[in-house]
Every structure is written in C-alpha cells, then in structure tokens.
Image: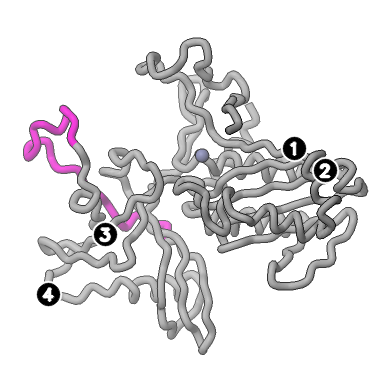
C-alpha cells in the first residue's frame, strides 16, 4: 500500500469540500508543476511540449500536456472524472428562526443518502459572489470549523425510528447553527461577509449571492484491522480527480495527455461545464480548428471515464449479480454498458 499517496488523497478530499475547492486545489498543483492557464475569452497560442489548463465556472477543469507528437496522428490519452458529490446545499433564502434556534434551509443536491447527514458535525463551504469597489467578484470560502448540526429526533419521541421512516427534506433537514430569539434578525449574508473578511481580507462588500453546501468536518481515515479501507466523504469522485491529476503530473512527455474534471455529474451533467455539455469539445476544437485534424485526433484518442464502483456488500450479497460483483481491493472495475 502506498501510504503517502493514500494520505495525500485524504488531505486533498479534506481540503476540497466543494467542486470550487477541488478545482482550486488542483490548479495549485498544476501551477506548481508549470501548467499555464488559458482563458476561454482570450486568444490561445499553444506550443508543442506545453502544459496548459482551462477552468469553467470555477468548478470544472481541463488540463493537458502536449508532446512532440501530432494530435491528429496519435490522439490524446484522456481521463474523465467529476468534481461534485451528492450533498446538502443551502437554499437561496436560508434563514429560518424557529423555537429559538437559528437554522438554515436545505436543498438536496444529487442522489444523496440522507440518513448519514444526521448527528454529524457539519461546516459550510462554497462560493460567494459580491461587489467590492465597484467590481463584481467571486471567492471561495470554507468555515472549516463545525458550525452546524442536523440532530436526529430522540428515540423517546419516535419509538418507530428503527423501523424506518421517510425523511421529509423540507421539515427534517434544516440545520441548526445557533440559538437566537425568533424576533431577533438573523442576517446570513452578514455572516458570509465576515467570513470573506477573515479568509480574503476583503471588507465593505455588497454580497449578492452564494452557492454553499454543508460538509462533514470529520477527516477521512485509513481504517480496518489491517488498514484495508479508506473511509471518507466525497471519494465519489474526488478519488478519481486525485488519481487523474497524479497520472497527468507523473506522465512522461512522449504522449498527448488530458484530464477533464466536470461538475454537475450528480445532477445529470447537462450544463455548460458538465460532461454532457460542450466544455471538452470546445477546448479540443480550439486546439484543432481544422475539422479533419479534429476528427482524426478523436478517432486516435482514448478517454477513460473514471469513477468509484460499488463493491459487494457482505450484508447485502443479493444486491449484486453473483458472477459480476466487484470485489473490494481486487483491482479496477470495468463497467460494460451497451452503446445506444
Ligand atoms: Zn461518481
């Protein structure tokens, strides 16, 4: 087991509570390795042997390394991943004052399993957009410390709790972040402006909007009597972002290589920065405006779409096809799906 790599993965996930943070952390590593940013609104002049990256919406990233090989002749070796994970996002108007508690309204992002979010120490992170000195800006923030909780109802008040019940997202998910009398004003944007000042030393902002989500502050760990497992939030799919980035950074210079990390996989991928959107195609066409060269490159390329697979769960063996159940720690899983 490569302990250093595993701990680096856990550190990356801990520092990446949202897709915005994941992209920012990958950019830090890319720039340290000499990768240059290309801006989609500017002209590009890419060179043989060059190292480049493009970001869109601050939450999707394409990084590539060009070798001396012609793209049309040898194509690109590509890895595709996604930066987002199912989570609990804050509603646009999140403030709730109820029973002398200050709460934040929650909207479920993606196909989240809801019960693990109860009784966890939660924090808030994401992107805030504001006007500062007449200029529109966005910054990422991360409260880091545990400031929110979604407490379960005590067993004494719900004797049916262990018999299963449907979680009402509207009424049971609002997170508690403090106490406050119901007639006291609760200004969440003021709290965000304060955090912006703490993290970025920016004051006197007109806070316009935010895209924030809750995350579990417990750091991932290597667990098991023989340390067989990595236990962490957001392994799906920050694991593949991390592995894809390592692969790109450690690749030699003999081939053209590309890493694409898309946001919005958990909600269908159909956005301008999602995998079913135009991001990758538009970047490739900027590199190869000639349609024949582009088509030849695509035909000579390989893209591996990487994600986590669901291993056989010993408590639920009948949930898998017994001849095709993925065995944990026994190597990569190849998913077969008919092309329609
Ligand atoms: Zn996934």
Do tag 4 and tag 1 residues touch (Cβ < 8 Å)?
no
Residue 166 visible to an observer of this rendering: yes
Which residue has dot 3 on it? 105
Characterize the local packing of mark 4: few (<14), some (14-19) or many (20 or more) Cα atoms within 10 angstroms: few
The question of residue 64 being in magenta is answered with no
Q: Which residue is nearer to you in this view: 36 or 217?
A: 36
Which residue has dot 4 on it? 183
Q: Nearer the viewer, mark 4 or mark 1?
A: 1
Percent coordinates x, y for residue 283 in the rendering? 72, 57
Residue 141 versus residue 82 in the image, above or below: below
Q: Nearer the viewer, mark 2 or mark 3?
A: 2
Percent coordinates x, y for residue 173 in the rendering? 24, 50
Q: Nearer the viewer, mark 4 or mark 2?
A: 2
Q: Residue at x 60, y 43 (%)?
A: 81
- Is disc 4 placed on a helix, strand or loop? loop
Q: Nearer the viewer, mark 3 or mark 4?
A: 3
Percent coordinates x, y for residue 134 in the rendering? 51, 89
Q: CA distance from mark 2 to mark 3?
A: 47 Å
Q: CA distance from mark 4 to mark 2?
A: 64 Å
Find out if the beta carbon at label 1 lies less than 8 Å from the nearest ligand 1 atom: no
Is 337 on the left-hand or right-hand side of 116?
Answer: right
- Is disc 3 placed on a helix, strand or loop? strand
Ranked by sequence position, the earlier of labels 4 and 2 is 2
Q: Residue at x 56, y 59 (%)?
A: 272
Percent coordinates x, y for residue 135 in the rendering? 54, 84
Q: CA distance from mark 3 to mark 1?
A: 43 Å
Which residue has dot 1 on it? 302
Residue 75, label in figure: 2
Residue 91 versus residue 88 in the image, above or below: below
Do tag 1 and tag 2 residues touch (Cβ < 8 Å)?
yes
**Range of the magenta residues?**
143-165
Which quarter of the image is occupied by the C terminus?
Answer: top right
């Amino acid at each position: 087991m490569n302990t250093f790599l595993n701990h680096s993965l856990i550190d990356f996930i801990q520092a990446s509570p949202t897709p915005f943070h994941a992209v920012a952390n990958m950019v830090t590593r890319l720039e340290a390795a000499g990768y240059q940013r290309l801006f989609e609104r500017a002209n590009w002049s890419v060179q043989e042997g060059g190292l480049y990256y493009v970001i869109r919406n601050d939450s999707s990233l394409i990084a590539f390394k060009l070798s001396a090989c012609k793209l049309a002749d040898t194509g690109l070796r590509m890895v595709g991943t996604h930066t987002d994970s199912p989570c609990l996002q804050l509603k646009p108007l999140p403030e709730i004052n109820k029973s002398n508690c200050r709460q934040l309204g929650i909207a479920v992002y993606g196909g989240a399993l809801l019960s693990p979010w109860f009784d966890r120490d939660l924090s808030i992170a994401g992107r805030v957009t504001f006007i500062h000195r007449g200029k529109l800006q966005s910054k990422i923030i991360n409260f880091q410390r545990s400031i929110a909780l979604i407490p379960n109802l005590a067993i004494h008040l719900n004797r049916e709790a262990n018999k299963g019940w449907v979680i009402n997202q509207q009424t049971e998910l609002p997170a508690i972040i403090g106490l406050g009398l119901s007639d006291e004003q609760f200004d969440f944007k003021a709290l965000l402006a304060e955090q912006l000042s703490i993290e970025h030393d920016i004051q006197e902002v007109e806070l316009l909007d935010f895209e924030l989500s809750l995350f579990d502050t417990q750091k991932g760990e290597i667990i098991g009597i023989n340390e067989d497992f990595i236990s962490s939030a957001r392994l799906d799919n920050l694991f593949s972002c991390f592995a894809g980035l390592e692969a790109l950074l450690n690749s030699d210079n003999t081939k053209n290589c590309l890493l694409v990390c898309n946001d919005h996989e958990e909600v269908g991928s159909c956005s301008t920065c999602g995998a079913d959107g135009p991001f990758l195609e538009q970047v490739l066409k900027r590199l190869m405006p000639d349609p024949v060269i582009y088509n030849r490159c695509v035909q000579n390329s390989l893209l591996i779409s990487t994600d986590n697979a669901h291993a056989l769960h010993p408590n639920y063996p009948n949930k898998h096809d017994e001849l095709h159940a993925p065995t944990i720690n026994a190597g990569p899983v190849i998913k077969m799906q008919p092309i329609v």
